[in-house]
Each structure stands twice: as structure tokens, then as C-alpha cells.
Image (spheres, rainbow, N blue to C red):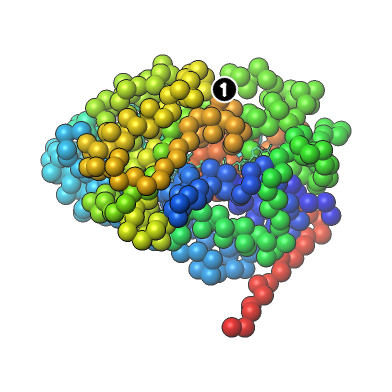
């Protein structure tokens, strides 16, 4: 039997490979870069290990499921450690809010910030649960490739007021501007502007409260390695340094791929984890595309991009929490600059990651490892990053010196950064979008890239720009959708039981 080829080894691609293998398909993963993981790459430098991308692990059962599907115990492969607080939100006026899962603790802090908002928060949390019960439980792993699927949910979406943005919805319940920011920054972690992302994304609040926030021992890279390992055990190769140059189409169906080195590999089906905008415009000949034409793709809105600076310090910053949101003086104005005006602002709001708060092994003894992430416009801005990146990083570090990390610049022993060029060139994302398509109303559910191509038979999509969307729960759920839209093989291949080596 010819394998199903998965193009790309981000979490969506690896999860799809597991699920397809569990369905009985032979599977081959082809990855352009030297290591698996996509946005979850790992940078190793001067004894430090920096996770390049995702660090906030939510809905952990979605990872566990991948191992149990193959008859494995996830605890033999990786360990997730709870993070508390989930995030510390730091304001320019010096106040701090610990965003946690425990209701009493969160309410106590709301009381200190704005006693009048306690009741509003309770109602907002109830709303978040209501949205979660529909938006996540019922829709996240359902295919949306028929218009009728979409029409069926429209009344429910109207009832839940999905036409409102996350910010508007939260503002219906909460008056204090700082608290509004605490409960609306989350869409930024999946590429959305809280002022434009539909309120269905308020479900993130309930998802975090329900299942918690975790960090893997050994970093997010350890999760990637555990998936590559279990795939290897069941006969799925993740071939790195193998960029795909073309999807081969015969009689309207995907029949294989051609790699950049000219190798042809035949396939029963092709699943693309790579950016669908790139796949359609660069890898699938225009003569096979009626729906996903170059013109229709050019009209789509890519998410913002990111500047991420990685650095290691001599000594520790014990007061810095594992996840800190360092909010700047402007909220809406800054988001306007990033998403709409596409200019590089002088101020910023940052996400500061200190993995060594949970796992000191990620830095040499006596040192701390960090990354600092700043949302920036995507490459449609025309910003000259060659000239701007170094000074931008320097300004971020200056600001961190004032915001809880005194003397940081003089204590840095190693550093590096990525900017929108990395997402565009290294990860092959159109316009350097860090999260694929922006999650706005007209790019969600049926309007997002379908998991089953409407143009080419046996061509499928998983990952951030396909339904349901970006973020680890999103891309892991896109693999669940594939299970529903792809056929099982006529003669499935058994998954080998785990070989237990006597110690
Ligand atoms: C800095 C950062 C921080 C984030 N933090 C969080 C977080 O804390 N929590 C969270 O839930 N989410 C977070 N996200 C979002 C999350 O990381 C992504 O949505 C998710 O990892 C994307 O996975 P994916 O399956 O779409 O694949 P990607 O990770 O996008 O991988 C796609 C892969 O396809 C490969 N590829 C592309 N073209 C080809 C080709 N032609 N041939 C072969 N291979 C190809 C690429 O090299 C890449 O490896 C973060 C994202 C970023 C960038």
C-alpha cells in the first residue's frame, strides 16, 4: 500500500501522522527543515535550550490521546508540569494580576482590582463556559467542508453573539480597563486581534480553567521528540531536510509529491501541514484549482507576525513568573498599529517566558533562560527588518530593565532573535504570518481552509490555517477532523505493540 504523505512536521502534522497510522495507513512525514516541530523548533545555544514557539500547553488530554491511540502509556514518553499562575499580567502602573485557574483566587484578585467587577466576572465565566460547550465541545473536531455544516450552526452562533469581538463581549461584563485586558489578550496567542476576533474565542478562558496550563519537562521540544519517537516505533519515518516542491495531481487526485531534489514519492493521499496559502499557490498547479485560486488566496488576511528574542542571563530572576504578560501603555492603539496600520510602534506589549522557573535543566547551572515575544505587523508592512531587528530587540531589553528585570542587559551571556523573515523563509508562511490565517469571523469554521481540499481529490490539510485554527489545541483538533474526513484503508496495517526491553 502506498503511504499517506504528510507534508510538514508541526504539531498538526505529527498528530495527523499518529492518527492516520492508528487508522491503519502507512505514513511518511516529509519536513523541509533539519528538525521536526515547525513552530515548536528548539534553539540550542551556549548550553541553553530555547523553545522557539509554543510554551503554554493547554488541553493536555489531546496529547495523551495520541499515545493511547497507539496503545502506549503517555507517561512513558513525557511529563507535563502544572504552571501556577497560568500567567502573571504586569501593568505599567506597577500592579500585577495572577491569572490562575482557581475561582476563589481569581475572584479575590478581581476584588482587589475592582470590587464592582466580581459579579460581572462570574457572569462572564459562565458565558465563557456556555461558548466552550458549543464552540469547543461540539465544533472543534467537526469537519466544516460543507456550507450546510456552517448554516446549521449559524442560529447558535447568533444566540451566543459571535458577531461581537472578544473585547466587546468581555466589556459587557467587566468595567475595569486593566481587567478587560487580562481577559482579552488570549486571542493574541492564536494570532488574533482581541478587537476583531469573534467572541467564540472567549472559550479559551474556560478551556484554561477547566484543564489547566502545563509545561513539559525538558521543554516543548520534549513533546515533539516524544511524538517523533512513538511514530518511529510504529514505523512512521519523519524525513527532515526534505522540502516538497510539488503536489502531483492525476485525474483530479493527489497521487504523490515531488521533492525539491527532484525525487518523486507516490502516495495514497497527501496531507499538508504546511501553510495552505503557500501549498495552493506554490505546490499545486493553477490548472487544478477552481476554488483556491491565486486571486482568492491574495484576498485572505494573514495573522500578525512576531519578533521573538531569546536570551540567557547569568544568575536568576526568581521574581519573574514562568509566563508573564508585560502590558504597555497602549492596548487598542498598539493593536491597531500592528494589525491595521502595519507600522512598527515605539511601545510594545510583551510575553516574557522564563522556562527555567519550571525546569532549571534548560540553562546551565546558575543561569536563567528567557524568551520575549512581541507581536509585530506581518510582511505586508514592508518593514525593513534587516535594519530594524537589532535596535528593536535592544529597546525591548531596555523596557524589561524597567519592568522587573533590573540590570538584565549586563547579565546576558547569550542571545538570538527571530523576526517575520523567519516565519516567511524558514517556515514558508505567506507574508510571514506567525499563526497562519487571522482568526476573524470571515476566516473561521467553513470560511477557514477546509481540511479536505475542494479542488483536488485525496488532498487534505491540517494545522493552524485549516479548521479549527491555530494554537496547540486547534492544530491537534485539526488532526481529529482528518480522522472524520479521510477513509480507512481497505486492508489496515496493524500497529506493532510496544517492544518492552527487559532492564
Ligand atoms: C512564538 C510562538 C509562540 C506560540 N505560543 C503558543 C503557546 O504558548 N500555546 C499554543 O497553544 N500555541 C502557541 N503558538 C501557536 C502554535 O505554536 C501554532 O499554532 C502551532 O504550533 C502550529 O502548528 P502547525 O501544525 O500548524 O504546524 P507548523 O508548526 O506551522 O509547522 C508546519 C511545518 O511545515 C513545514 N513545511 C512548510 N513547507 C514545507 C514544504 N514545502 N515541504 C515540507 N515541509 C514544509 C515547515 O517547515 C514546518 O515544520 C505559538 C506560536 C508561535 C510562533
Q: Position of residue 491 (x, y in %)?
A: 82, 59
Q: Residue beneath label 1, please?
A: 300
Q: Residue at x 75, y 65 (%)?
A: 494
Residue toward you, 68 or 339: 339
**Residue 31's image quarter?**
top right
Residue 103 visible in image: no
Asked if residue 307 lies left or right of residue 462, the reply is left
* Residue 147 screen position, x and y as percent: 62, 30
Secondary structure beneath dot 1 equals loop
At horizontal 70% and vertical 34% (from top left) the residue drawn is 453
| Above/below status of 147 relative to 209 | above
For the point 46% across and 28% down, the residue is: 304
Q: Nearer the viewer, residue 3 or 153?
A: 3
Give the image location of residue 78, x and y in percent.
Answer: 50, 64
Q: Compared with residue 208, is residue 286 higher up or lower down, i.e. above or below?
A: above
The quarter of the displayed image where residue 161 is located: top left
Total labels: the figure holds 1
In the image, taking residue 222 as reference, residue 336 lies left or right, namely left
**Taking 226 as reference, is 475 above or below it?**
above
Q: Nearer the viewer, residue 192 or 344?
A: 344
Disc 1 crowd rating (10 Å Cα; few below 14, some 14-19, many 20+) is: some
Instruction: Assign the N terminus to one quadrant of the image.
Output: bottom right
Residue drawn at x 57%, y 22% is: 300
Task: Answer yes or no: disc 1 within 8 Å of ligand 1.
Answer: no
User: From what the image shows, is residue 20 above or below residue 470?
Assistant: below
125 to the left or right of 444: left
Ligand 1, seen in the image, is in the quarter at top right
Amino acid at each position: 500500500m502506498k503511504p499517506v504523505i504528510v507534508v510538514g512536521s508541526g504539531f498538526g502534522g505529527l498528530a495527523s501522522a499518529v492518527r492516520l497510522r492508528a487508522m491503519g495507513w502507512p505514513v511518511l512525514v516529509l519536513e523541509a527543515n533539519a528538525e521536526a516541530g515547525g513552530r515548536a523548533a528548539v534553539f540550542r545555544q551556549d548550553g541553553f535550550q530555547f523553545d522557539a514557539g509554543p510554551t503554554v500547553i493547554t488541553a493536555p488530554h489531546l496529547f495523551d490521546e495520541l499515545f493511547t491511540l497507539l496503545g502506549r502509556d503517555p507517561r512513558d514518553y513525557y511529563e507535563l508540569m502544572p504552571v501556577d499562575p497560568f500567567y502573571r499580567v504586569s501593568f505599567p502602573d506597577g500592579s500585577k494580576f495572577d491569572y490562575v485557574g482557581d475561582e476563589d483566587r481569581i475572584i479575590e484578585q478581581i476584588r482587589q482590582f475592582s470590587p464592582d467587577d466580581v459579579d460581572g466576572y462570574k457572569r462572564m465565566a459562565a458565558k465563557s463556559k456556555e461558548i466552550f460547550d458549543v464552540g469547543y465541545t461540539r465544533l472543534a473536531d467537526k469537519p466544516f467542508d460543507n456550507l450546510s455544516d456552517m448554516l446549521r450552526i449559524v442560529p447558535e452562533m447568533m444566540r451566543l453573539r459571535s458577531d461581537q469581538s472578544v473585547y466587546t463581549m468581555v466589556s459587557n461584563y467587566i468595567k475595569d480597563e486593566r481587567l478587560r485586558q487580562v481577559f482579552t489578550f488570549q486571542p493574541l496567542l492564536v494570532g488574533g486581534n482581541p478587537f476583531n476576533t469573534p467572541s467564540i474565542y472567549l472559550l479559551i478562558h474556560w478551556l484554561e480553567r477547566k484543564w489547566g496550563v502545563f509545561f513539559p519537562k525538558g521543554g516543548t521540544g520534549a513533546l515533539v521528540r516524544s511524538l517523533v519517537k512513538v511514530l518511529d516505533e510504529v514505523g512512521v519515518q519523519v524525513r527532515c531536510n526534505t522540502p516538497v516542491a510539488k503536489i502531483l495531481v492525476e485525474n483530479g487526485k493527489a497521487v504523490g509529491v515531488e521533492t525539491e531534489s527532484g525525487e518523486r514519492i507516490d502516495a495514497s493521499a497527501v496531507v499538508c501541514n504546511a501553510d495552505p496559502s503557500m501549498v495552493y499557490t506554490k505546490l499545486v498547479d493553477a490548472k487544478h484549482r477552481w476554488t483556491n485560486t491565486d486571486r482568492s488566496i491574495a484576498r485572505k488576511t494573514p495573522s500578525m507576525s512576531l519578533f521573538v528574542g531569546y536570551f540567557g542571563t547569568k544568575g536568576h530572576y526568581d521574581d519573574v513568573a514562568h509566563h508573564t504578560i508585560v502590558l504597555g501603555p497602549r492596548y487598542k492603539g498598539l493593536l491597531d498599529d500592528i494589525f491595521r496600520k502595519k507600522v512598527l510602534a515605539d511601545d510594545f506589549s510583551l510575553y516574557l517566558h522564563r522556562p527555567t522557573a519550571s525546569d532549571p535543566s534548560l540553562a546551565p547551572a546558575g543561569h536563567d533562560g528567557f524568551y520575549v515575544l512581541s507581536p509585530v505587523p506581518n510582511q505586508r508592512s514592508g518593514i525593513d527588518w534587516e535594519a530594524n531587528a537589532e535596535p528593536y530587540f535592544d529597546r525591548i531589553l531596555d523596557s524589561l530593565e524597567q519592568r522587573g528585570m533590573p540590570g538584565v542587559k549586563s547579565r546576558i551571556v547569550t542571545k538570538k532573535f527571530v523576526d517575520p523573515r523567519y516565519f516567511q523563509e524558514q517556515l514558508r508562511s505567506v507574508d510571514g504570518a506567525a499563526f497562519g490565517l487571522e482568526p476573524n469571523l470571515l476566516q473561521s469554521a467553513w470560511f477557514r481552509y477546509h481540511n479536505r481540499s475542494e479542488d483536488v481529490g485525496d488532498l487534505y490539510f491540517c494545522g493552524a490555517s485549516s479548521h479549527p485554527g491555530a494554537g496547540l489545541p486547534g492544530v491537534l483538533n485539526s488532526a481529529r477532523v482528518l480522522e472524520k474526513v479521510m477513509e480507512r484503508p481497505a486492508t489496515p496495517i496493524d500497529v506493532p505493540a510496544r517492544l518492552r526491553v527487559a532492564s
